[in-house]
Amino acid sequence: MNLQQLPLISIVTFFPLVGAVILFFVKKENSELIKRFTLVWTILTFVLSLGFLIGFHPSDPGFQFYQNLPWIPQIGVGYQVGLDGISLLLIILTTGLMPLAILSSFNAITDRVKEYYIFLLLLEVGMLGVFVSLDLFLFYVFWEVTLVPMYFLIGIWGGKRRVYAAIKFFLYTMAGSLLMLLAILFLGINGGTFSLPDLLHNNAWLTRAGPTVELLLFIGFGIAFAIKVPMWPFHSWLPDAHVEAPTAGSVILAGVLLKMGTYGFLRFNLPLFPHASQQAAPVIITLAIIGIIYGAIVSFAQTDVKKLVAYSSVSHLGFVMLGIFALNQQGIQGAILQMVNHGISTGALFLLVGFVYERRHTREMAEFGGLWKIVPIYGSLMLVVALSSMGLPGLNGFVGEFTILLGSWAANPWWAALAALGVILAAIYILSMFQKMFMGETRNEENKHLIDLSRRELWVIVPLVVFIFVIGIMPQPFFNTMTASVNQLLQGMSSVVALR
């Protein structure tokens, strides 16, 4: 059977939507049934998505599992979807993280359970749609779809300042989205189509537009993506959203939603606006390096461990942006791998913070100490995840950051030298956090009665730890998946710039 001939993308993308519709007819009193059904449904979605890995041809740089159906032909909008080596790993990351986020919520969410799991399923539909859309209008629809369920997940099931955090998240994202919508409308009208492959194949519109318009279009898309990343100085919504979101919300926010921004730069800004990308690269890399150092310093200053992890994302995603705008193969491949690494490592950190919060109802590091002796399994897993986050050789974070630094060094050695400070600072704030929470003597009698991780919690965290080692030891299969697509992206950029 040729999997490429099946409408597998549509099946995987909308399978969670079918689950949400089924849950709609389940009585809200059946909370255990709702939890178990959602878990099984997201596992099935993950299993279906593995068909992409089986049927994918790494040597083919084009879009695979391609579908193109008429949707709104009057305005040139179609249902056009596909994936390549850039989006494949992010799709598997999305479907893989979702069951773990669901399972982590079993004890944490006790109020309005039905609505909670419906929103998570709808969120998965939107995220998958973003990574497979090849029509700009369709991409925008899925981009906006992710906004609504995350708003409610934070606003209803979040912490004490959940409403403030939810509104801030909504306003920031919506502001960027409106700029992107204007840029999409301009492209659709002047390019004669909303199809990304068609716009790339026939780039006469780019010549007609001129360099100034191209730069403005780059900015229109770029601000929307920069807010989502989030790049400094567009990051201020992130700590509030992360801290107030329920654990599963934080995992999905860090693991997948932030990657929509970096993915947007790769999928749209670089190929559609190659000349503007080269012009903007020094500015964006400057902001990325500021974000790397700023995020690390502010992380070190935190007393709330969840806020520390939240600010660390500003630093880690700064590395991703550095790799993307190094505009060479090593930098972009390192950035794509680091997007996956960040989803795994930071997702695991949020899960582990959530586990201890469920037991102690505090995230203040000063309230802990000596946890290694009390909960050794928890401490050991936290150590592995923390070391991966700071880029220890042999673990996933090292491979991504090292490849990014190689790419940035080839572009400009000063960029690599400054970014390397972030690696040192990461070691400082990560080890400081671990020392305060796990070493020495406990600072609170309540800690002495803590129970180590349950079987359910181990099922949640162990798969992520396994992949931390797998990617750290055997990264080549991941690089092989993306090489052809990255090379095609760079060749396309070079040819367009050369023609101009």
Image (cartoon, rainbow, N blue to C red):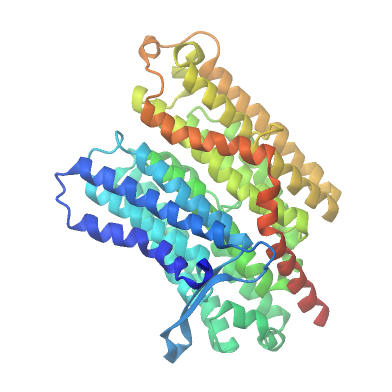
Residue 313 picture location, percent across and down = 57, 43
Q: Nearer the viewer, residue 129 or 161?
A: 129
Q: What residue appears at the point 74 percent right and 48 percent down from the top-left corner? A: 404
User: Residue 354: horizontal and vertical position, in percent?
Assistant: 41, 32
Q: Residue furthest bottom?
A: 74
Residue at x 42% of width, y 33% of height:
459
As displayed, is residue 483 above or below residue 236? Answer: below
Quarter of the figure that contains the C terminus: bottom right
The residue depicted at 42 percent of the width and 70 percent of the height is: 141
Snapshot quadrant of residue 296: top right
Quick one: 61 or 338, which is closer to the camera? Answer: 61
Q: Is residue 129 visible?
A: yes
Image quarter of residue 384: top right
Which residue is found at the position 60% from the left and 50% from the top? 339
Please tell me in which quadrant of the rendered image residue 424 appears.
Answer: top right
Counting from the top left corner in percent of width and height, residue 289 is at 71, 47
Q: Is residue 434 above or below residue 276?
A: above
